Image: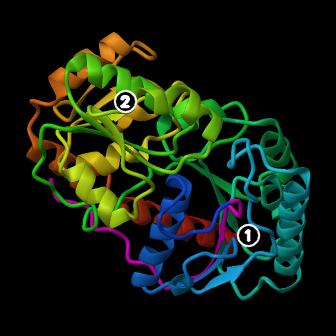
Amino acid sequence: MTAIPRREHDPLRICLVANCRFPIVEPFTGGLESMTWHLARELVRRGHEVSLFAAPGSDPSLGVIELEVDSVPAQSGRQDIDVPAAVEVAEHHAYLSLMLDLASAGDGFDVMHNNSLHYLPVAMARTLPMPMVTTLHTPPFPWLESAIRLDRGASSFAAVSQHTADTWAAVTDTTYVPNGIDVDRWTAGPGSSTAVWSGRLVAEKAPHHAVLAARRAGVPLVLAGPILDMGYYRELVEPLLGAEATYAGHLDQADLADLVGASSVALVTPVWDEPYGLVAAEALACGTPVAAYARGGLPEVIAPGTGRLALPGDVDDLARAITEAISLDRATCRAHAVASLSLGAMVDRYEDLYARMQDRRLAA
Protein backbone atom coordinates (compact mmCIF):
# COMPACT_ATOMS: atom_id res chain seq x y z
CA MET A 1 0.00 0.00 0.00
CA THR A 2 1.33 3.45 -0.92
CA ALA A 3 1.52 5.84 2.02
CA ILE A 4 -0.58 8.99 1.72
CA PRO A 5 1.74 12.00 1.97
CA ARG A 6 1.07 14.46 4.74
CA ARG A 7 -0.57 17.66 3.55
CA GLU A 8 1.79 20.62 3.40
CA HIS A 9 0.43 23.67 5.17
CA ASP A 10 0.84 27.37 4.47
CA PRO A 11 2.14 29.46 7.38
CA LEU A 12 -0.66 30.74 9.59
CA ARG A 13 -1.02 33.59 12.07
CA ILE A 14 -2.16 31.74 15.18
CA CYS A 15 -3.61 33.24 18.34
CA LEU A 16 -2.84 30.69 21.06
CA VAL A 17 -4.64 31.35 24.35
CA ALA A 18 -3.28 29.63 27.45
CA ASN A 19 -4.74 28.89 30.84
CA CYS A 20 -3.81 31.94 32.94
CA ARG A 21 -3.85 30.25 36.35
CA PHE A 22 -0.14 29.36 36.07
CA PRO A 23 2.66 30.69 33.84
CA ILE A 24 3.76 28.72 30.79
CA VAL A 25 7.33 28.15 31.94
CA GLU A 26 9.57 25.42 33.31
CA PRO A 27 9.29 23.71 35.68
CA PHE A 28 5.75 23.15 34.47
CA THR A 29 2.94 23.09 37.01
CA GLY A 30 1.13 20.37 35.06
CA GLY A 31 0.47 18.74 31.73
CA LEU A 32 -1.63 21.63 30.40
CA GLU A 33 1.24 24.09 30.82
CA SER A 34 3.71 21.63 29.30
CA MET A 35 1.46 20.90 26.32
CA THR A 36 0.91 24.61 25.60
CA TRP A 37 4.65 25.39 25.79
CA HIS A 38 5.56 22.56 23.43
CA LEU A 39 2.71 23.34 21.02
CA ALA A 40 3.77 26.98 20.73
CA ARG A 41 7.42 26.11 20.10
CA GLU A 42 6.67 23.44 17.52
CA LEU A 43 4.24 25.66 15.59
CA VAL A 44 6.90 28.39 15.43
CA ARG A 45 9.51 25.85 14.34
CA ARG A 46 7.22 24.88 11.46
CA GLY A 47 7.04 28.46 10.26
CA HIS A 48 3.80 29.68 11.78
CA GLU A 49 3.49 33.06 13.48
CA VAL A 50 2.26 32.40 17.02
CA SER A 51 1.00 34.98 19.52
CA LEU A 52 0.73 33.32 22.91
CA PHE A 53 -1.59 34.99 25.41
CA ALA A 54 -0.59 33.67 28.83
CA ALA A 55 -0.05 34.44 32.50
CA PRO A 56 2.64 36.85 33.70
CA GLY A 57 5.93 35.07 34.25
CA SER A 58 5.57 32.84 31.20
CA ASP A 59 8.63 31.92 29.13
CA PRO A 60 9.75 35.13 27.35
CA SER A 61 11.30 33.13 24.52
CA LEU A 62 7.76 32.33 23.36
CA GLY A 63 7.00 35.99 22.65
CA VAL A 64 4.25 35.99 25.25
CA ILE A 65 1.57 38.67 25.41
CA GLU A 66 0.76 38.72 29.11
CA LEU A 67 -2.85 38.55 30.20
CA GLU A 68 -3.74 41.05 32.91
CA VAL A 69 -4.28 38.67 35.81
CA ASP A 70 -2.61 38.36 39.18
CA SER A 71 -0.60 35.26 40.04
CA VAL A 72 -2.21 32.78 42.42
CA PRO A 73 -1.21 33.96 45.91
CA ALA A 74 0.35 31.75 48.56
CA GLN A 75 -2.38 30.11 50.62
CA SER A 76 -3.24 27.13 52.76
CA GLY A 77 -5.62 25.42 50.30
CA ARG A 78 -5.25 23.93 46.84
CA GLN A 79 -3.23 26.27 44.64
CA ASP A 80 -4.84 25.03 41.43
CA ILE A 81 -8.51 25.20 42.47
CA ASP A 82 -8.95 26.95 45.82
CA VAL A 83 -8.20 30.46 44.62
CA PRO A 84 -9.68 33.58 46.17
CA ALA A 85 -12.73 35.10 44.51
CA ALA A 86 -10.64 38.16 43.55
CA VAL A 87 -8.39 35.97 41.40
CA GLU A 88 -11.38 34.38 39.68
CA VAL A 89 -12.77 37.83 38.92
CA ALA A 90 -9.38 38.92 37.57
CA GLU A 91 -9.28 35.88 35.28
CA HIS A 92 -12.78 36.63 34.05
CA HIS A 93 -11.83 40.21 33.22
CA ALA A 94 -8.57 39.14 31.58
CA TYR A 95 -10.36 36.83 29.16
CA LEU A 96 -13.23 39.26 28.63
CA SER A 97 -10.75 42.00 27.72
CA LEU A 98 -8.89 39.67 25.37
CA MET A 99 -12.04 38.51 23.59
CA LEU A 100 -13.36 42.05 23.18
CA ASP A 101 -10.01 43.10 21.69
CA LEU A 102 -9.97 40.14 19.31
CA ALA A 103 -13.59 40.73 18.29
CA SER A 104 -12.75 44.25 17.16
CA ALA A 105 -9.18 43.82 15.93
CA GLY A 106 -8.59 40.09 15.56
CA ASP A 107 -8.40 40.07 11.77
CA GLY A 108 -4.63 39.88 12.13
CA PHE A 109 -5.04 36.18 12.92
CA ASP A 110 -6.02 33.25 10.73
CA VAL A 111 -7.08 30.99 13.58
CA MET A 112 -7.47 31.04 17.35
CA HIS A 113 -6.49 28.00 19.42
CA ASN A 114 -8.09 28.18 22.85
CA ASN A 115 -6.19 26.14 25.42
CA SER A 116 -7.50 28.05 28.42
CA LEU A 117 -10.15 25.85 30.09
CA HIS A 118 -12.08 29.09 30.67
CA TYR A 119 -15.68 29.48 29.53
CA LEU A 120 -15.49 33.02 28.13
CA PRO A 121 -13.50 32.33 24.93
CA VAL A 122 -16.00 29.62 24.02
CA ALA A 123 -19.07 31.68 24.92
CA MET A 124 -17.80 34.61 22.82
CA ALA A 125 -16.54 32.60 19.82
CA ARG A 126 -19.34 33.98 17.63
CA THR A 127 -17.90 37.49 17.96
CA LEU A 128 -14.53 36.59 16.42
CA PRO A 129 -13.47 37.36 12.85
CA MET A 130 -11.44 34.12 12.71
CA PRO A 131 -12.32 30.46 13.39
CA MET A 132 -11.52 29.03 16.82
CA VAL A 133 -10.67 25.56 18.06
CA THR A 134 -10.85 24.72 21.77
CA THR A 135 -8.92 21.79 23.19
CA LEU A 136 -10.90 19.95 25.85
CA HIS A 137 -8.47 18.84 28.57
CA THR A 138 -11.03 17.93 31.24
CA PRO A 139 -14.30 16.07 31.69
CA PRO A 140 -17.41 18.25 31.24
CA PHE A 141 -18.08 20.87 33.88
CA PRO A 142 -21.10 23.18 34.06
CA TRP A 143 -19.57 26.55 33.11
CA LEU A 144 -17.90 25.20 29.99
CA GLU A 145 -20.93 23.10 29.00
CA SER A 146 -23.08 26.22 29.20
CA ALA A 147 -20.58 28.19 27.12
CA ILE A 148 -20.58 25.52 24.39
CA ARG A 149 -24.33 25.84 24.11
CA LEU A 150 -23.92 29.61 23.65
CA ASP A 151 -21.28 28.91 21.00
CA ARG A 152 -23.96 27.55 18.61
CA GLY A 153 -21.49 25.85 16.31
CA ALA A 154 -19.24 28.88 15.88
CA SER A 155 -16.08 26.99 16.79
CA SER A 156 -14.50 23.55 16.71
CA PHE A 157 -13.43 21.28 19.56
CA ALA A 158 -10.60 18.81 20.00
CA ALA A 159 -10.35 16.17 22.74
CA VAL A 160 -7.04 14.92 24.12
CA SER A 161 -8.16 11.27 24.22
CA GLN A 162 -10.98 9.12 22.94
CA HIS A 163 -12.11 8.77 26.55
CA THR A 164 -12.38 12.56 26.85
CA ALA A 165 -14.17 12.77 23.50
CA ASP A 166 -16.70 10.22 24.74
CA THR A 167 -17.36 12.19 27.95
CA TRP A 168 -18.16 15.28 25.87
CA ALA A 169 -20.19 13.47 23.20
CA ALA A 170 -23.54 14.53 24.65
CA VAL A 171 -22.43 18.19 24.62
CA THR A 172 -20.47 18.63 21.38
CA ASP A 173 -18.71 16.82 18.56
CA THR A 174 -14.95 16.72 18.86
CA THR A 175 -11.86 15.88 16.82
CA TYR A 176 -9.56 13.39 18.54
CA VAL A 177 -6.10 14.96 18.92
CA PRO A 178 -4.07 13.07 21.54
CA ASN A 179 -1.46 15.01 23.45
CA GLY A 180 2.11 14.53 22.32
CA ILE A 181 5.53 14.75 23.95
CA ASP A 182 8.86 15.88 22.51
CA VAL A 183 10.69 12.59 22.04
CA ASP A 184 13.92 14.53 21.41
CA ARG A 185 13.75 15.97 24.94
CA TRP A 186 12.36 12.84 26.59
CA THR A 187 15.13 10.49 25.51
CA ALA A 188 15.80 6.84 26.25
CA GLY A 189 17.40 6.21 29.62
CA PRO A 190 19.24 3.24 31.14
CA GLY A 191 16.73 2.33 33.81
CA SER A 192 17.70 1.13 37.30
CA SER A 193 16.18 -0.65 40.29
CA THR A 194 14.17 2.41 41.40
CA ALA A 195 10.60 3.33 40.44
CA VAL A 196 9.37 6.87 39.78
CA TRP A 197 6.12 8.78 40.22
CA SER A 198 5.79 12.27 38.68
CA GLY A 199 3.04 14.87 38.53
CA ARG A 200 1.12 17.29 40.72
CA LEU A 201 1.06 16.09 44.32
CA VAL A 202 -2.68 16.35 44.90
CA ALA A 203 -5.32 13.96 46.17
CA GLU A 204 -6.78 12.97 42.79
CA LYS A 205 -3.31 11.92 41.56
CA ALA A 206 -2.88 9.78 44.72
CA PRO A 207 0.92 9.60 44.98
CA HIS A 208 0.46 7.97 48.38
CA HIS A 209 -0.94 4.94 46.52
CA ALA A 210 2.31 4.79 44.56
CA VAL A 211 4.34 4.75 47.78
CA LEU A 212 2.22 1.99 49.27
CA ALA A 213 2.25 -0.15 46.12
CA ALA A 214 6.00 0.26 45.57
CA ARG A 215 6.59 -0.77 49.19
CA ARG A 216 4.50 -3.91 48.71
CA ALA A 217 6.39 -4.70 45.50
CA GLY A 218 9.72 -4.20 47.28
CA VAL A 219 10.83 -1.43 44.90
CA PRO A 220 12.33 1.92 46.03
CA LEU A 221 10.40 4.95 44.77
CA VAL A 222 11.20 8.59 43.97
CA LEU A 223 8.37 11.17 43.79
CA ALA A 224 8.73 14.38 41.77
CA GLY A 225 6.43 17.30 41.08
CA PRO A 226 4.87 20.44 42.55
CA ILE A 227 3.03 20.20 45.86
CA LEU A 228 -0.23 22.03 45.16
CA ASP A 229 -2.09 20.71 48.20
CA MET A 230 0.18 20.99 51.24
CA GLY A 231 -2.51 19.67 53.58
CA TYR A 232 -2.87 16.47 51.55
CA TYR A 233 0.90 16.10 51.22
CA ARG A 234 1.54 16.47 54.95
CA GLU A 235 -1.28 14.15 55.97
CA LEU A 236 -0.93 11.26 53.50
CA VAL A 237 2.38 11.49 51.65
CA GLU A 238 5.05 12.90 53.95
CA PRO A 239 4.52 10.30 56.72
CA LEU A 240 5.27 7.54 54.17
CA LEU A 241 8.62 8.98 53.08
CA GLY A 242 11.90 7.52 54.23
CA ALA A 243 14.77 5.43 52.94
CA GLU A 244 12.62 3.57 50.39
CA ALA A 245 10.46 6.48 49.26
CA THR A 246 11.86 9.98 48.71
CA TYR A 247 10.67 13.30 47.30
CA ALA A 248 12.98 14.88 44.72
CA GLY A 249 11.15 18.23 44.43
CA HIS A 250 9.69 20.10 41.49
CA LEU A 251 12.17 19.43 38.66
CA ASP A 252 12.65 21.13 35.33
CA GLN A 253 12.07 18.99 32.26
CA ALA A 254 15.68 17.97 31.64
CA ASP A 255 16.21 16.81 35.22
CA LEU A 256 12.85 15.07 35.30
CA ALA A 257 13.60 13.25 32.03
CA ASP A 258 16.91 12.08 33.51
CA LEU A 259 15.11 10.80 36.61
CA VAL A 260 12.38 9.04 34.64
CA GLY A 261 14.87 7.51 32.21
CA ALA A 262 16.96 6.21 35.10
CA SER A 263 13.95 4.42 36.64
CA SER A 264 12.84 0.83 36.23
CA VAL A 265 9.11 1.60 36.10
CA ALA A 266 6.86 4.68 36.22
CA LEU A 267 3.79 4.61 38.44
CA VAL A 268 0.61 6.49 37.46
CA THR A 269 -2.08 6.39 40.15
CA PRO A 270 -5.10 8.60 39.41
CA VAL A 271 -8.19 8.13 41.53
CA TRP A 272 -10.19 10.14 39.01
CA ASP A 273 -10.65 9.56 35.28
CA GLU A 274 -7.43 11.02 33.90
CA PRO A 275 -8.30 12.80 30.61
CA TYR A 276 -5.05 11.68 28.95
CA GLY A 277 -2.02 10.72 31.05
CA LEU A 278 0.93 12.80 29.80
CA VAL A 279 3.31 11.46 32.46
CA ALA A 280 2.79 7.94 31.07
CA ALA A 281 3.72 9.10 27.58
CA GLU A 282 6.80 10.87 28.94
CA ALA A 283 7.91 7.72 30.73
CA LEU A 284 7.48 5.56 27.63
CA ALA A 285 9.55 8.00 25.58
CA CYS A 286 12.34 7.42 28.11
CA GLY A 287 11.98 3.68 27.60
CA THR A 288 10.50 3.29 31.08
CA PRO A 289 7.53 0.91 31.26
CA VAL A 290 4.42 2.04 33.13
CA ALA A 291 2.33 0.53 35.92
CA ALA A 292 -0.94 2.43 36.14
CA TYR A 293 -4.52 2.36 37.28
CA ALA A 294 -6.80 1.68 34.32
CA ARG A 295 -8.71 4.95 34.46
CA GLY A 296 -9.68 7.57 31.89
CA GLY A 297 -7.38 7.89 28.90
CA LEU A 298 -4.47 5.89 30.34
CA PRO A 299 -5.39 2.59 28.63
CA GLU A 300 -5.09 4.47 25.30
CA VAL A 301 -1.54 5.59 26.09
CA ILE A 302 -0.20 2.24 27.29
CA ALA A 303 0.07 -0.19 24.39
CA PRO A 304 0.64 -3.95 24.77
CA GLY A 305 4.21 -4.62 25.85
CA THR A 306 4.75 -1.13 27.28
CA GLY A 307 3.11 -1.40 30.68
CA ARG A 308 0.66 -3.10 32.96
CA LEU A 309 -2.73 -1.81 34.07
CA ALA A 310 -4.16 -2.35 37.54
CA LEU A 311 -7.68 -2.27 38.91
CA PRO A 312 -8.51 1.35 39.81
CA GLY A 313 -7.73 2.12 43.43
CA ASP A 314 -6.40 -1.39 44.18
CA VAL A 315 -2.94 -0.95 45.74
CA ASP A 316 -2.28 -4.70 45.83
CA ASP A 317 -3.07 -5.04 42.13
CA LEU A 318 -0.84 -2.04 41.41
CA ALA A 319 2.00 -3.82 43.24
CA ARG A 320 1.43 -6.78 40.92
CA ALA A 321 1.53 -4.44 37.91
CA ILE A 322 4.83 -2.94 39.11
CA THR A 323 6.45 -6.36 39.39
CA GLU A 324 5.30 -7.35 35.90
CA ALA A 325 6.09 -4.03 34.20
CA ILE A 326 9.71 -3.92 35.37
CA SER A 327 10.61 -6.84 33.09
CA LEU A 328 9.16 -5.27 29.91
CA ASP A 329 11.44 -4.31 27.02
CA ARG A 330 12.53 -0.68 27.21
CA ALA A 331 13.14 -0.42 23.46
CA THR A 332 9.52 -1.42 22.82
CA CYS A 333 8.34 1.34 25.16
CA ARG A 334 10.47 3.95 23.41
CA ALA A 335 9.40 2.79 19.93
CA HIS A 336 5.71 3.08 20.84
CA ALA A 337 6.20 6.64 22.13
CA VAL A 338 8.09 7.71 19.00
CA ALA A 339 5.53 6.16 16.66
CA SER A 340 2.30 7.13 18.39
CA LEU A 341 2.76 9.64 21.22
CA SER A 342 5.03 12.30 19.77
CA LEU A 343 4.73 16.06 19.65
CA GLY A 344 5.14 15.88 15.89
CA ALA A 345 2.11 13.63 15.51
CA MET A 346 0.02 15.95 17.71
CA VAL A 347 0.96 19.08 15.77
CA ASP A 348 0.37 17.32 12.44
CA ARG A 349 -3.22 16.78 13.55
CA TYR A 350 -3.65 20.36 14.74
CA GLU A 351 -2.27 21.70 11.45
CA ASP A 352 -4.77 19.54 9.57
CA LEU A 353 -7.57 20.83 11.83
CA TYR A 354 -6.50 24.45 11.30
CA ALA A 355 -6.51 23.84 7.54
CA ARG A 356 -10.03 22.37 7.60
CA MET A 357 -11.23 25.35 9.60
CA GLN A 358 -9.68 27.69 7.02
CA ASP A 359 -11.30 25.73 4.18
CA ARG A 360 -14.72 26.03 5.80
CA ARG A 361 -14.18 29.75 6.38
CA LEU A 362 -13.31 30.32 2.72
CA ALA A 363 -16.28 28.25 1.54
CA ALA A 364 -18.76 30.13 3.73
Query: Where 277 falls versus 235 (above or below)?
Result: below
Residue 10 painted magenta: yes
At which x and y percent is residue 75? 75, 50
Dot 1 amino acid type:
Ala
> In the shown orientation, is residue 84 left or right of residue 33?
right
The secondary element bearing badge 1 is classed as loop
Q: Is residue 53 magenta?
A: no
Which badge, 1 or 2, comes first in the chain's sequence? 2
Kind of residue at disc 2: Pro
Using the image, tell me which numbered label, if any, was put on residue 299: 2
Name the image quarter holding residue 77: top right
> Mark 1 and mark 2: span between their CA atoms?
39 Å
Q: Residues within 10 Å of mark 2 (few under 14, many from 20)?
A: some
Provide the residue designation for mark 1.
364
Magenta highlight range = 1-21
Q: What residue do we see at 42% from left, 29% from top?
A: 269
Marks 1 and 2 in Cβ contact (< 8 Å): no
Closest to the observer: 37 or 142? 37
Location of residue 206 in the rendering, given as x and y in whole percent from the top left corner? 49, 29
The quarter of the picture where residue 186 lies is bottom left
Q: Decide whether the magenta segment is chiefly helix, strand or loop.
A: loop
Q: Quadrant of residue 180?
A: bottom left
Q: Residue at x 32, y 51 (%)?
A: 282
- Does 269 sit above or below residue 360? above
Mark 1, other Cα within 10 Å: few <14 / some 14–19 / many ≥20? few
